[in-house]
Image (spheres, rainbow, N blue to C red):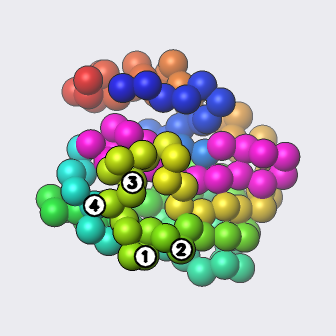
Amino acid sequence: MAFPADYRYTKEHEWIKVDGNQATIGITDYAQNSLGDIVFVELPKVGEELTAGKTFGSVESVKAVSELYAPASGKVVAINESLATAPEKINSDAHGSWMLRIQLKDAGEVNKLLSSDDYDKYVKEEGGH
């Protein structure tokens, strides 16, 4: 699996891509592969505040329900509405199928997350591919 180098990653398998003072968040290809066919995504509403490391929603697959954890703190400014009717998009393009965008509270939090190389090593140690 390839993990884009311009993203940062959590050990809970979320990714974040920073663009100025905003960031886009989703789950990794490793996560969607582990979950199997995704059938439902629960996301926060625009305007809600996220706290780094705390849950902000969930992903339901045919195998399990998995909590989503915020990789950084901030205010939700957009959600990917298309996932409500087509959550399986995550299975076909995990890094392209973003879940939400936030206004970052502290961009420094992102620097504490895993680089693509570190995340790749982490999933291999965890029993990944």
- Of the two numbered discs 4 and 2 on the same chain, state the one appearing first in sequence: 4
Q: Which mark is residue 48?
A: none
Circle 1 sits in a helix, a strand or a loop, which is it? helix
Circle 2 residue: 81
CB contact under 8 Å: marks 4 and 3: yes
- Of the two numbered discs 3 and 1 on the same chain, state the one appearing first in sequence: 1
Q: What amino acid type should be assigned to the residue bearing mark 1?
A: Ala
Q: What amino acid type should be assigned to the residue bearing mark 2?
A: Glu
Q: What amino acid type should be assigned to the residue bearing mark 3?
A: Ile
Q: Which stretch appears magenta?
A: 17-33
Circle 4 residue: 38
Q: Tell me if I can see residue 56 in this picture.
A: yes
Q: Which mark is residue 90?
A: 3
Determine the CA span between mark 4 and mark 1.
Answer: 11 Å
Q: Assess whether residue 12 is covered by the magenta stretch.
A: no
Where does the image place residue 66, in percent across and percent down from the top left? 31, 60
Circle 1 residue: 84
